[in-house]
Amino acid sequence: MSRLVSLPGALRIQWRTLLLGLAALLVTACLWRPEWPLPRQVFRYMVVFDITQSMNTRDYHLDGLPDDRLGFAKESVRAALHRLPCGSEIGLGLFTTQTVHFLFEPLEICGHFGVINDVLSHIDWRMAWSADTHVEMGLYHAIRELKKHSPGVRLVFLTDGQETPPQSVKPQSDGVAGEISGLLVGVGGTVPVTVPRYDRNNQSMGVWENADIEKPPVSTTVYSEKVVPRLLPSEGPYLSWLDEPHLRAISVETGLGYERLASPARLAQTLISPAYAERRPTATDLRPFMGGAALTLLLWVFGIDKSPVSRRKRKPLP
């Protein structure tokens, strides 16, 4: 009879040993960082910064954030990097004059965060290859390049929308609205302010004057129709502001969404919107699942198995 009574206890000890061994095995496996491709919602963006000198204008006034447009735009994209899920991809590009240069194709953010963040930190207005700003032409160029190389990637184009010198003729789009999805982000304030002028060592030289701005172009083969140009005064400081009506009109023509850059949190929230997500197999870190399973086994062995109910059930027979 004593042998029969001791049998459940022996089985219970064996089960506890087995569960402890399984928990230890799961914890040990986590050291190899196991991954498995699982379908999940991720995001793929090519982020292009306007680096013309109007983006040095200082019209942001949020504590702890840069007050210049380019600096504020960079910090806003950095905030979005922290919100995007692993498996998402980001590429960075630059715009000046009428063309866009992609610095690198979209990279997975968790595995390459250090590289992306380092490149983002070093983006500077001095990387510009010309001083003029033809935003509409630059945007069309970015769309053409994405169609050729990465048609599934969403475009995020950050600019104040100001054409310098002012447009006298309108660029011709050779695409179809909506063929590239994404967001046109308006950077800056709507109140006209002066534009700082720096030398190549980034030392202040005062502000840009209207006399320094070239005259608008008269004609070129890539333009389709004339527009009434904005006339600049011959004297006085050159003033810059977020040309929101212009950017909204371009967004309609291209099919891109439009949003004014008000805060890093708001941009990050927009970039994780389901409207820009795609579901695709993504290497998923299994450590949280395996760690959770190991914790459940340990709670079972040391918690539930020692509960008052279990002790009453194991009370020896008289």
Image (cartoon, rainbow, N blue to C red):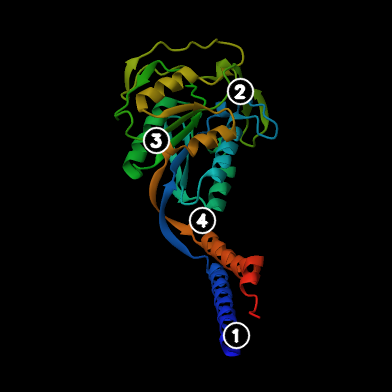
- Residue 195 bears which disc, if any? 2
Residue type, numbered disc 3 = Ala
Percent of width and height locating residue 173: 32, 26
The residue where tag 3 is placed is 142
Q: Residue at x 56, y 61 (%)?
A: 292
Q: Nearer the viewer, mark 1 or mark 2?
A: 1
Q: Earlier in the sequence, mark 1 or mark 4?
A: 1
Mark 4 → mark 2, Cα distance in angstroms:
38 Å
Q: Is residue 86 above or below residue 169?
A: below
Residue type, numbered disc 1 = Ser
Quick one: SS at disc 3?
helix
Q: Earlier in the sequence, mark 2 or mark 3?
A: 3
Mark 1 → mark 2, Cα distance in angstroms:
87 Å
Mark 4 → mark 3, Cα distance in angstroms:
26 Å
The residue where tag 4 is placed is 111
Mark 1 → mark 4, Cα distance in angstroms:
54 Å
Q: Residues within 10 Å of mark 1 (few under 14, many from 20)?
A: few
